[in-house]
Image (tube, rainbow, N blue to C red):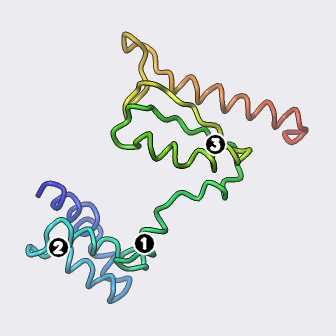
Amino acid sequence: WVVNLALKYFYAFRHRATLRRHSETYANAVRGMLSLKSGAVETFCYSRKLSGLGCSDGWLDMQQPRLKEIKVPTLSINSRDDPVCVWRNVEASMPEIFANPHMVLAEMHRGSHGCKLGVWGGANYANRMIREFVMGCWQEWRDAGCGA
């Protein structure tokens, strides 16, 4: 019931006036989401209708990564013990990641889903990796004569 309440509040209640003005379809979706009769599954289904694709396979397809389309330097930091971005999804995407010259995968054995802290919690490895990645990309861009 907590997830259902959060969906209702963050996706419908907070934006109800704007969504109702958008279209009758959106107004119906908001009405369905805010109904006390709709459980978490129904509320989520109504929220998908706000995408314009309805509660369908089209919405699910829209949620899939399109790694081939990435054309800018991209660093993906993933931990093997991440309970949210599970490692088997990373493994399934590895052929696309490795085929894209703009992507880098930083694989960490531990780090869970939050910040990637050191042994004693005093250092954040993700911040260091991001800084080095951005500075390296900037240096390559300058060396290629793009920055002057």
Q: How far across and how far down the image is residue 112, in percent?
A: 37, 31
Q: Earlier in the sequence, mark 1 or mark 3?
A: 1
Q: Amino acid at mark 2?
A: Leu
Q: How far across and how far down the image is residue 53, in percent?
A: 43, 79
- In this rendered view, identify the residue nearer to me: 26 or 86: 86
Q: Residues within 10 Å of mark 1 (few under 14, many from 20)?
A: some
Residue visible at 30% across and 81% down in the picture: 20
Q: CA distance from mark 3 to mark 2?
A: 38 Å
Q: CA distance from mark 1 to mark 2?
A: 21 Å
Residue hosting label 1: 59
Mark drawn on residue 34? 2
Q: Nearer the viewer, mark 1 or mark 2?
A: 1
Tell me where residue 4 sits by quadrant: bottom left
Q: How far across and how far down the image is residue 88, in percent?
A: 44, 43
Please indicate whether residue 147 sits to the left or right of residue 101 in the image.
Answer: right
Mark drawn on residue 23? none
Q: Amino acid at mark 3?
A: Thr
> Secondary structure under badge 2?
helix
Q: Earlier in the sequence, mark 1 or mark 2?
A: 2
Q: How far across and how far down the image is residue 22, in percent?
A: 38, 82
Mark drawn on residue 74? 3
> Secondary structure under badge 1?
helix
- In this rendered view, identify the residue nearer to me: 2 or 110: 110
